[in-house]
């Protein structure tokens, strides 16, 4: 998998900004494109793009953002990802690694031109609480089994109550 993480290494917390992965084929892996789970507060992540990915024989999930350590992830694009297998097309979630972990944020995510098998598990979008919501997720041209989905329900996308601004459409701007 191609992963973006932040760590507190030797007391230094650094951001991950302006990261781009493009034109990749991933085979026989657990995941294709991932942000987190190591997302240390103070090492925010912005302007990250995964584009033109093809995944072959994935064991788990296609695109993942998991914030567990208090970080802010803002401005992520998953564009033109094609998958032939796997459990969930994508997961967006905010949670705490442990009781003392800070709680982070996820904002401004684009999921464009994703193509997944007809039979998959639902894709969760789970904010943490009312102060730590996932905000502004735009999904367009999401194909499941080759059919463009235009509602969250038919796409199998399930946001919890701690999300705002989750939209889906058949075409991308």
Image (cartoon, helix red, strand yellow):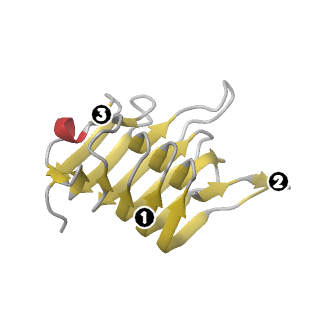
Q: Which residue is mark 1?
A: 54
Tag 2, which secondary structure?
loop
Left or right, residue 6 beside residue 118: right
Q: How far separated are the C-alphas under marks 2 and 1? A: 37 Å
Q: In which image quadrant can residue 67 be found?
A: top right
Tag 1, which secondary structure?
strand
Q: In which image quadrant can residue 100 be found?
A: top right
For the point 82% across and 54% down, the residue is 11
Q: Which residue is mark 3?
A: 158
Q: Which residue is mark 2?
A: 11
Q: Which quadrant would the N terminus be assigned to in this image? A: bottom right
Q: How far separated are the C-alphas under marks 2 and 3? A: 38 Å
Q: How far separated are the C-alphas under marks 1 and 3? A: 24 Å
Label 1 or label 3, whichever lies nearer to me, is 1
Q: Are marks 2 and 1 in contact (CB under 8 Å)?
A: no
Left or right, residue 77 beside residue 105: left
For the point 21% across and 48% down, the residue is 167
Circle nearer the N terminus (2, 1): 2
Q: In which image quadrant can residue 165 be found?
A: top left
Circle nearer the N terminus (2, 3): 2
């Amino acid at each position: 998998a191609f992963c973006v993480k932040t760590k507190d290494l030797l007391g230094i917390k650094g951001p991950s900004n302006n990261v781009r992965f493009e034109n990749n084929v991933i085979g026989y892996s657990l995941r294709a494109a991932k942000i987190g789970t190591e997302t240390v507060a103070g090492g925010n992540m912005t302007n990250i793009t995964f584009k033109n990915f093809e995944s072959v024989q994935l064991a788990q999930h296609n695109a993942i953002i998991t914030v567990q350590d208090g970080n802010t992830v803002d401005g992520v694009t998953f564009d033109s990802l094609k998958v032939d297998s796997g459990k969930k097309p994508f997961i967006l979630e905010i949670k705490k690694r442990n009781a003392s972990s800070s709680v982070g944020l996820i904002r401004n995510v684009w999921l464009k031109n994703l193509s997944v098998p007809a039979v998959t598990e639902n894709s969760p979008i789970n904010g943490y609480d009312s102060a730590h919501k996932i905000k502004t997720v735009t999904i367009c041209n999401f194909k499941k089994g080759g059919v463009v989905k235009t509602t969250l329900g038919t796409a199998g996308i399930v946001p919890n109550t701690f999300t705002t601004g989750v939209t889906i459409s058949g075409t991308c701007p």
